[in-house]
Amino acid sequence: STHGYSGGAQIGYNFHVADGIVAGVEADATFSDIGGDIFFNGKNVASTLDYSGTIRGRIGVLVTPSALLYATGGAAIGRFSHEIAIGALTMSDSQTFTGWTAGGGIETFLTDRLTMKIEYLYTDYSRETVELTGAEDMGAIADFDHTVQTVRAGLNYKF
């Protein structure tokens, strides 16, 4: 099961490449408490995304004079916390992983300076082997396959 929340900020720059074509670059940072867990073979295994960030290129086409349909992709970084509980023993670890992200969205002007966007991103932090440590110097090694699918809405101010 998965649950949690996220919120963040972004900064970017866009420019007109040709008639009706816009390109740009964006960077964002998101703080979150999105987690999931599973009970498997007598163990409760949990993973939580603490924060993430991306730097992405973006290219789009103006579908109306004020609405941009775009594709985006680039590099991603995320900090995950992991936990395995076996009876009363709990082992945990936190690590930062890198990966890639790709997606798309639509952005439209609300005023001459304010835009609104809805965006989908698929992010893959790859499969990672994590060594978890617990009480009495006991440990466990677990493989985590971190992929995140995000639909988000945003408001942007154009300077």
Image (cartoon, rainbow, N blue to C red):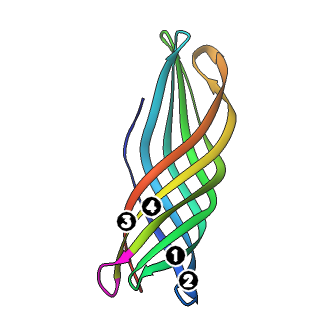
Q: Which mark is residue 12?
A: 1
Against 126, residue 69 (above or below) is below
Q: Nearer the viewer, mark 4 or mark 1?
A: 4
Q: CA distance from mark 4 to mark 2?
A: 18 Å
Question: What's the amino acid at mark 2?
Answer: Ile
Against 23, residue 9 (above or below) is above
Q: What kind of element bears circle 2?
A: strand
Question: What's the amino acid at mark 4?
Answer: Glu
Which of the pair 98/64 is nearer the observer? 64
Q: Earlier in the sequence, mark 3 or mark 4?
A: 4
Q: CA distance from mark 4 to mark 1?
A: 15 Å
Number of residues whose C-alpha sits closer than 10 Å to that of mark 1, classed few (under 14), some (14–19) or many (20 or more): some
Q: Which mark is residue 21?
A: 2
Q: Which residue is mark 4?
A: 119
What residue lies at 62% left-to-right and 35% top-to-bottom? 145
Specify whether residue 120 is painted magenta: no
Which of the pair 57/136 is nearer the observer? 57
What residue lies at 42% left-to-right and 60% top-to-bottom? 8
Bounds of the magenta segment = 108-113
Q: Earlier in the sequence, mark 3 or mark 1?
A: 1
Q: CA distance from mark 3 to mark 1?
A: 13 Å
Q: Are marks 3 and 1 in contact (CB under 8 Å)?
A: no
Q: Which residue is mark 3?
A: 154
What residue lies at 40% left-to-right and 83% top-to-bottom? 158
Q: CA distance from mark 2 to mark 1?
A: 16 Å
Q: What kind of element bears circle 4?
A: strand
